[in-house]
Image: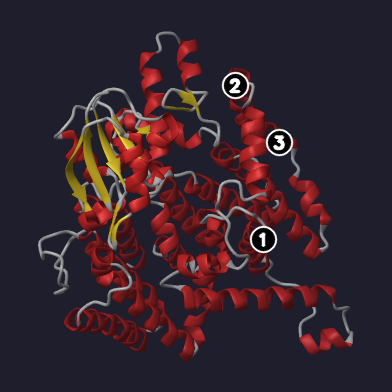
């Protein structure tokens, strides 16, 4: 019965909510529309190929606007182009590769835990499925889930080999590390070697490391990875320099790509990514560190010594918490040293944290949760509820404008109800039902975000207007591209001036045509549509307006409409 209910929760989180929201939210950020466009162009080249050699060649080099794009390996592009071929070129289809890998991650977490750690397997799977980081990145048309999911599945397989000594499980680590390498490059095998090596060193069992270097597995890894790397280098002699030196080593060592963050940045990311389970997850991680430290002391205390007597145990026990703690902490520490930091980099650290959390909740059934842990979790669920319900207001009016009293009261009542629900469920049915209550709240909030239900009296947004539509107009290029499609055909020129990169790449994807950027290619000579970011909430940016007048000196241009949600103005610029 519990497994059936868990499946229902899982289905609601990853199946029903996107469909109830229609097409969902459009592609956001710079990476989503850019990666989706690359996959679209590769599919077009594949469709135009006539021979097998041409088809293979079309799948080797990623192209953006007809030019090679060598920042990332091709796994995401391959998977996206083939779902485009089956379902059509839509933004929700571009996210299917990440959704499918998230499904595999959650499903195999459940199966692994049921096989090797029965009891907490459903908790671990549902916590993984219902934490903000996994939910968010599973809906992203990006390479982050393409790395995290196979890498995590491979590491679970490696630990299965460590426990069983069956070579069958070693195929997992080599196969899935190869898949992760085709997603993001050498960072995948590096993280595997780092985690396995540190685990062997901490346990002083170097045979673990050396026996993991299994020649059939190594052959399998290179058989999967090398063909594409060799082929793309053959087609693009600059690939090694651009990919390995610039987008791996230089990205790590310098701030060339302007993603610099403080050294503690990923601590905040982890706290946010594990919501609403953050309180229990941090308690579980501390408990895992404690058990790992105790395990280490047991192994290094001589039998009959005073230390062994104080510990009270003379034989080492379970190494799984130790492995999970290292797996969780090492990617965070490694990427904290990088000069370029993005939230998705430490996505591989989330599965071990959620597995620790599920195992911790299972063990807590017998003795119960500490009061402060349960109360902290319930309060955090309430805070998340209030934040989601007030999201439409803050999107529409900005973070500096406080919502009206009745909207805040309505959100507060819902938040209090969620908090009380958690406490009552645990008091009545015990810790084993905590996952049910928390996941139920998460499903309701996702339904709200996808526009199912009212806005709970929040003013400034029509009751019939979906939250997802408001977010779409504020953060995606899709609504603006649809508006432009009613004015000019898809093959007509659209240009941008001082807009964010996500708007530039987004318009290019939705129109399937490169957008001219005034600062990069100048002013197109023909008549065109111009999207400018000069109108802000505090008035007109005079410097941008003056620069635009200099660009368009001698050209006639008329304002067509404004797009206040993203501070944009759209002009029709006459021909030269």
* Percent position of residue 466, x then y: 17, 59
Q: Is residue 506 visible?
A: no
Q: How many marks?
A: 3
Which quarter of the image is occupied by the C terminus?
top left
Q: Residue at x 43, y 34 (%)?
A: 79
How far apart are labels 3 and 1 at the CA level?
23 Å
Residue identified by numbered label 2 = 236
Location of residue 453 with respect to 419 vertically, above or below: above
Residue 533 seen from this side: yes
Front-most of residues 84 and 544: 544
Q: Residues within 10 Å of mark 1 (few under 14, many from 20)?
A: some
What x and y, as percent, mark residue 110? Answer: 47, 59
Residue at the location (27% across, 61% down)?
537
The front one of 159 and 548 is 548
First in residue order: circle 3 vs circle 1? 3
* Element type at mark 2: loop
Residue pointed to by mark 3? 218
Is 36 or 179 nearer to us in this picture? 36
**Which residue is identified by label 1?**
330
């Amino acid at each position: 019965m519990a497994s059936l209910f868990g499946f229902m929760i899982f289905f609601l989180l990853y199946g029903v909510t996107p469909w109830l929201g229609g097409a969902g939210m459009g592609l956001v950020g710079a990476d989503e529309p850019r990666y989706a466009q690359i996959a679209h162009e590769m599919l077009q080249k594949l469709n135009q190929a006539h021979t097998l050699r041409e088809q293979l060649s079309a799948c080797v080099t990623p192209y953006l606007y007809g030019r090679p794009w060598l920042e990332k390996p091709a796994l995401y592009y391959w998977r996206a182009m083939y779902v485009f071929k089956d379902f059509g070129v839509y933004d929700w289809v571009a996210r299917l590769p990440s959704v499918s890998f998230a499904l595999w991650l959650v499903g195999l977490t459940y199966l692994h835990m049921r096989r090797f750690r029965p009891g907490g397997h459903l908790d671990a799977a549902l916590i993984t499925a219902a934490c903000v980081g996994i939910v968010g990145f599973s809906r992203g048309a990006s390479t982050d889930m393409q790395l995290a999911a196979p890498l995590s599945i491979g590491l679970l397989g490696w630990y299965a080999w460590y426990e069983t000594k069956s070579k069958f499980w070693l195929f997992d680590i080599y196969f899935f590390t190869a898949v992760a390498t085709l997603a993001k490059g050498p960072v995948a095998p590096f993280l595997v070697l780092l985690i396995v090596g540190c685990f062997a060193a901490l346990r002083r069992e170097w045979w673990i490391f050396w026996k993991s270097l299994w020649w059939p597995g190594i052959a399998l890894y290179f058989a999967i990875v090398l063909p594409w790397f060799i082929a793309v280098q053959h087609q693009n002699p600059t690939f090694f320099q651009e990919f390995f030196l610039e987008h791996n080593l230089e990205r790590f060592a310098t701030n060339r790509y302007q993603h610099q963050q403080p050294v503690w940045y990923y601590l905040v990311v982890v706290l946010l990514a594990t919501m609403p389970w953050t309180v229990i997850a941090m308690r579980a991680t501390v408990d895992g560190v404690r058990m790992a430290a105790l395990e280490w002391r047991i192994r290094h205390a001589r039998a009959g010594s005073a230390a062994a007597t104080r510990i009270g145990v003379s034989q080492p026990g379970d190494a799984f918490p130790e492995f999970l703690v290292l797996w969780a902490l090492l990617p965070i520490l490694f990427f904290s040293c990088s000069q370029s930091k993005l939230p998705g980099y430490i996505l591989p650290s989330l599965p071990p944290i959620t597995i620790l959390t599920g195992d911790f909740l299972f063990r807590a059934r017998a003795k119960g949760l500490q009061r402060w842990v349960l109360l902290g979790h319930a309060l955090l669920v309430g805070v998340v509820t209030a934040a989601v319900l007030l999201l439409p207001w803050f999107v529409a009016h900005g973070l500096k404008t406080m919502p009206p009293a009745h909207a805040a009261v309505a959100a507060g009542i819902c938040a209090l109800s969620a908090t009380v629900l958690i406490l009552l469920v645990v008091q009545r049915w015990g810790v084993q039902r905590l996952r049910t209550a928390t996941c139920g709240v998460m499903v309701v909030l996702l339904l709200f975000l996808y526009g199912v239900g009212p806005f709970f009296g929040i003013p400034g947004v029509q009751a019939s207007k979906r939250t997802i539509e408001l977010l779409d107009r504020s953060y995606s290029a899709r609504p603006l591209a649809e508006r432009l499609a009613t004015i000019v055909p898809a093959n007509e020129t659209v240009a941008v001036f001082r807009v964010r990169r996500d708007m530039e790449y987004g318009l290019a994807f939705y129109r399937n045509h490169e957008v001219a950027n005034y600062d990069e290619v100048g002013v197109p000579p023909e008549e065109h549509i111009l999207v400018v970011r000069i109108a802000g909430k505090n008035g007109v940016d005079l410097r941008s307006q003056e620069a635009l007048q200099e660009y368009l000196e001698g050209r006639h241009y008329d304002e067509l409409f404004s797009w206040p949600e993203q501070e944009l103005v759209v002009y029709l610029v006459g021909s030269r």
